[in-house]
Image (cartoon, grey):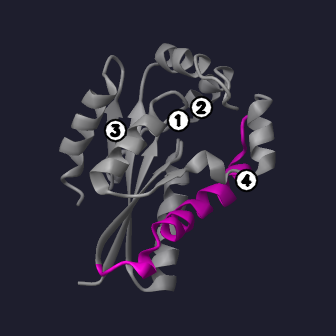
Amino acid sequence: MSHHFTVWVVAGPAGCGKTTTAKELCKVFDAPYVEGDSLHTGLNITKMENNIPLSDADREPWLKSIVPKCFDVAEIADKPKGKHYCVVTCSALKKKYRDIIRQSARALRDQRGISIGVHFIFLTANEEVLIDRVHSRKDHYMKDSMVESQLIIQELPSISEQVDSITVHVDGKTPEQVLTEIRREIKNFD
């Protein structure tokens, strides 16, 4: 068996529970965690702090950096052959953003010559829940006023994306219930 590397992208709008869910998934997969927001440029963060939505051009380099960063953090080359994972948070709100991440995985696979896959766990909730959660955060650059702009552009994974994506509605669910649902769903992918 050779190396097989899978990146689990926990996606969705601000306030949906990406970080909480991702950290729990790291325990499930015994995998490192990458906070996707930490990969944004300083300019992107400044824009978001000032309630300026990012353009697709702002996002593209960030999206392209996610899988390579996960690969580096997971240190695959130093591990025995077999299955290895990384869990990353990234809003990935549009299909074309998820496609950029998929394309970067294919490019890295071709460059490194090992099997690299990407799966998306898209979390969603109603606007009031998201705004309330974002509003209650301390010391985070994402403001609750940005939730509306994210929901305007949000595209839930389509039927064609079901080969590598699941959608979980988190309204009224505890983090444990969300994780239980995810664990049940992801058995189809691994």
CA separation in Å, label 3 and label 1: 13 Å
Question: What's the amino acid at mark 2?
Answer: Gln
Q: How many marks?
A: 4
Q: Viewer-nearest of labels 3 and 1?
A: 3
Tell me if 95 is positioned left or right of 24 in this view.
right
Magenta part of the protein: which range?
A: 53-81
Residue name at image x 52 percent, y 19 percent: 133
Q: Is residue 102 above or below residue 110?
A: above
Residue type pointed to by label 4: Ala
Mark pair 3, 4: CA separation: 26 Å
Horizontal and vertical percent position of residue 3:
33, 79
Q: Residue 157: which quarter of the image?
A: top left
* Foreground of the two, 77 or 131: 77
Kind of residue indicated by mark 1: Gln
Residue contact between numbered discs 4 and 2, judged by CB atoms under 8 Å: no
In this figure, which residue is indicated by the disc labeled 3? Answer: 167
Quarter of the figure with the C terminus? bottom left
Give the residue at x 58% y 16%: 136
Q: Is residue 140 above or below residue 135?
A: below
Tell me whether the residue at label 2 lies in contact with that at label 1, contact meaning CB atoms closer than 8 angstroms. yes
Marks 3 and 4: CB-CB under 8 Å? no
Is residue 15 visible in this depiction of the protein? yes
- The answer, for residue 52, to whether it is visible in the render is no
Task: Give 37 or 76, whichever is nearer the viewer.
Answer: 76
Residue positioned 46% across, 29% down in the render = 16
- Label 2: few (<14), some (14–19) or many (≥20) C-alpha neighbours in 10 Å: some
The location of residue 68, given as percent across then percent down, is 55, 68
